[in-house]
Image (spheres, grey):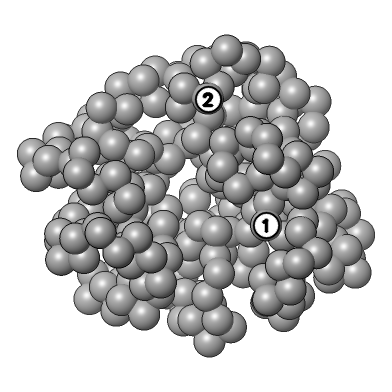
Amino acid sequence: MELIDTHCHLDVADFDADRDAVRAACKDAGLTALVIPAIHARGWPGLLELCVAKGRPRLYPALGLHPVYLEQHADADLVDLERLVKRSRPLAIGEIGLDFYVRELDAGRQQRLFEAQLGIAQDAGLPVLLHVRKAHDEVLAALRRIPVCGGIAHAFNGSLQQAAQYLELGFKLGFGGMLTFERSTKLRRLAAQLPMEAIVLETDAPDMTVASHQGERNSPEYLPQVLAALAEIRAVDHAEIAARTTANARAVLGLA
């Protein structure tokens, strides 16, 4: 089986001690590609350097300014992002979006940064990797104002109706470790109801780990456990889930 982790922060310090070993474990687990979204501007150089390193699975960079790290972003970062996107041609713009769950974050500034990055993605013809908490309606409205060539709503936790709106705009929906917890009844029901062409797999490592590693660092090598949970929920063979979700990821991200 061939698997793609569409959202994994392998570049962060949590993996400094064993990054090569994790990558080797991913290869053994059947992963052929990891998409590595950025968090803030100071991480862009290291992320790009990591993704040019040869080996398997292949690592693909996304560049962007994560809304939760709002205080670490400067307006000049947008100029640098636009320049770097033209020079390095990342796979996507991300991780970008709106987070209204964290109340102390300035909603207006989040919105301005998000829409500016949508504009960069639009001009570059790149998909976007979305971080959305308590803000699906606002994100969907922004995507209608500034249309992009699709992308992924990472760690999707919205309604079936909101899911349909993302699909209409050319997006896929990312499901990860939370799917492996039986108590995630709403999420598991949603994963059963969605059309198969809507779903891609992710880990969000080192965060949002799987049930078998609760309380521990998450790792992209655990992606097969997400696949197994989805196969159980939908009562579909593992190989079919792998084939469909990998095809979905390749289609939305433009991977050969």
Q: Secondary structure at mark 1?
A: helix
Closest to the observer: 185 or 244? 185
Closest to the observer: 210 or 239? 210
Taking 108 as reference, is 197 left or right?
right
Taking 28 as reference, is 116 left or right?
left
Taking 74 as reference, is 184 left or right?
right
Residue 140 can be seen, yes or no: no
Q: Quadrant of residue 103?
A: bottom left
Instruction: Indicate whether 226 appears above or below 90.
Output: below
Q: Position of residue 169 (x, y in %)?
A: 42, 74
Q: Which mark is residue 239?
A: none
Please state which amino acid type lies under the numbered disc 2: Asp
**At x 57% / y 12%, what residue is drawn?**
17
Q: Earlier in the sequence, mark 1 or mark 2?
A: 2
| Residue for badge 1 | 178
Residue 178 can be seen, yes or no: yes
**At x 72% / y 33%, what residue is drawn?**
221
Label 1 and label 2: CA atoms lie apart by 20 Å
How many other residues sit within 10 Å of disc 1, few (<14), some (14-19) or many (≥20)? many
| Residue for badge 2 | 14
Please state which amino acid type lies under the numbered disc 1: Met
